[in-house]
Image (spheres, rainbow, N blue to C red):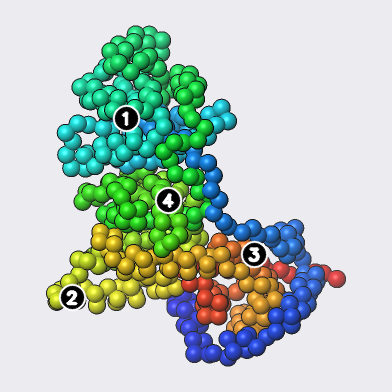
Amino acid sequence: MASDNREFEFADDYDDDDNLVENLAEIDDTLADQRAAALRAGLEDYDLDPDDAALLEGLVHGEDGIEFLPALPVVAIVGRPNVGKSALVNRILGRREAVVEDTPGVTRDRVTYKAEWMDRRFSLVDTGGWEPDARGIDRSVAAQAEIAIDLCDVVLFVVDAMVGATSTDEHVVKMLRKSGKPVFLVANKIDDARHEPEAAALWNLGLGEPYPVSAIHGRGVADLLDHMMKVLPDVSAVAKHEIGGPRRVAILGRPNVGKSSLLNKAAGEERVVVNELAGTTRDPVDEVVEVGGKLWRFVDTAGIRRRVHLQQGADFYASLRTSTALEKAEVAVVVLDVSEPVSEQDVRIIDLVLESGRALVLAFNKWDRLNDDDMEDIDRRRYLEREIEQDLAHVAWAPRVNISARTGRHLDKLVPALETALDSWDQRISTGKFNAFLSELVAEHPHPLRGGKQPRILFGTQASTRPPTFVLFTTGFLDPGYRRFIQRRLRELYGFEGTPIVLNMRVRERRQR
């Protein structure tokens, strides 16, 4: 523990020195490139492996842009709870994507997936179970299913053939007839030929021939899809254009901090179910929204609980999908509840973002609950600043926005914060400038002696962006405190606001002559 304290003290020794920034500002780009070329040539005297050579060759980088593609046809899967809708989704996708559990009501939101069959791509929408006269959260779930029917081209109506048609199924049939959409009646849970007579009984629903399938085992699903392709349009009549370019934003946080409310306010509609019940969202929900005059792809995720609660059930799989959504995102908005103290769980979620290498924005939500005239709320604001200084000091570089997802207060400030974080995430420093930076830094603050030896930095380069990743070729191991010192100096000079910085070392020895 003492060594850790020494490292932090070592890194903090140089906070007041501004000479480095002034010197680097005066260095000519051409001179910096020449100096970097000389340093790189000096590496030939050291043992380098094939990976080193590949790194030094450099990388080619493309440009991001928004590309509009024809809107994919949309297939909605509807039915009452626990008939196997999500299992059918997973079977069509060919992977376990939707959360499935032998409990009614696991799926709650409209969740869209990209699927493909016979070289044709389409959007597949999983919905929560529909029930008449539902109350509370079940009413919100049913409403999302009804919206899915309105916004699709083809409906797969799933019925549990082993139970038979129920009064709820008959209510769904009435709703489907009013929609005027092509409907395929899917008789699920027909696991073998002996059960097929059960499917025949569903002719009584008046939707035509039932298709006997087993979503769990895959039986009959291919035949169902073959028939569906005959009526599925090439371009959707209801969906928006496919958008290839919007930046992907994952919304993370503890349960019930307001993630779904944030997505709904950004989308301008009740896109996901919001309820006081913690853990309402189970599957990541994608939505293209326009905020600040730009298109973004927001991904609402399940709240990350403490590990002790993740041993079994739907919440466990929801947490796994949250991690997957984070890996697919470019920037993470971690939502914190200002009415509650910053918890260890909040810090762990932020650390999860850092480990993934994604850009980071901190959104402090529920400011509408803090009254300017209430002494308790005034004290809460003061304590919050202290908590941020103590518990979130390691992400002091992350942009902060104070919002109210319920009222939409200051939501417009989220866009500049996202743009700043993403620009930093994409930022690249030329090899010449980076080596000039290293030379000036080492000249003013050389690495201390360790065991009678002083490790030298031979050469440095930025290996990649997203996040900015730097590689240092050295003659010895650099202290963690010195590496943090380099990172902090990089932020002071080049910004990198909103993105983690990765600093790797490659210790190389001089060749034997």
**Res 179 label:** 1
**Image height of 304 relative to 125, above or below:** below
As drawn, 173 above or below 472 = above
**Splitting the image into 4 quarters, where does residue 383 fall?**
bottom left
Mark 4 and mark 3: span between their CA atoms? 32 Å
Q: Earlier in the sequence, mark 2 or mark 4?
A: 4
**Of helix, strand and loop, which one carries label 3?**
strand
* Mark 1 to mark 3 CA distance (whole Å): 54 Å
Q: Which residue is at the far right?
A: 513
282 vs 73, left or right, is: left
Which residue position is annotated with label 4?
A: 288
Specify the quadrant of the image occupied by residue 191.
top left
Alpha carbon of mark 3 to alpha carbon of mark 2: how far? 48 Å
Q: Which residue is mark 3?
A: 463
Mark with earlier residue (3, 2): 2
Secondary structure state at the residue bearing disc 4: strand
Is residue 502 visible in the rendered image? The answer is: no
The percent coordinates of residue 255 (x first, y second) are 29, 53
Marks counted in the figure total 4
Q: Residue at x 67, y 70 (%)?
A: 461
Task: Single out the mark in the foreground, 2 or 4.
Answer: 4
Relative to 367, say whether 240 is above or below: above
Kindly state the secondary structure of the residue where label 1 is placed.
helix
Residue, disc 2: 372
> Residue at coordinates 43% horizontally, 68% vertically from top-left?
416
- Label 1 vs 3, first from the N-terminus: 1
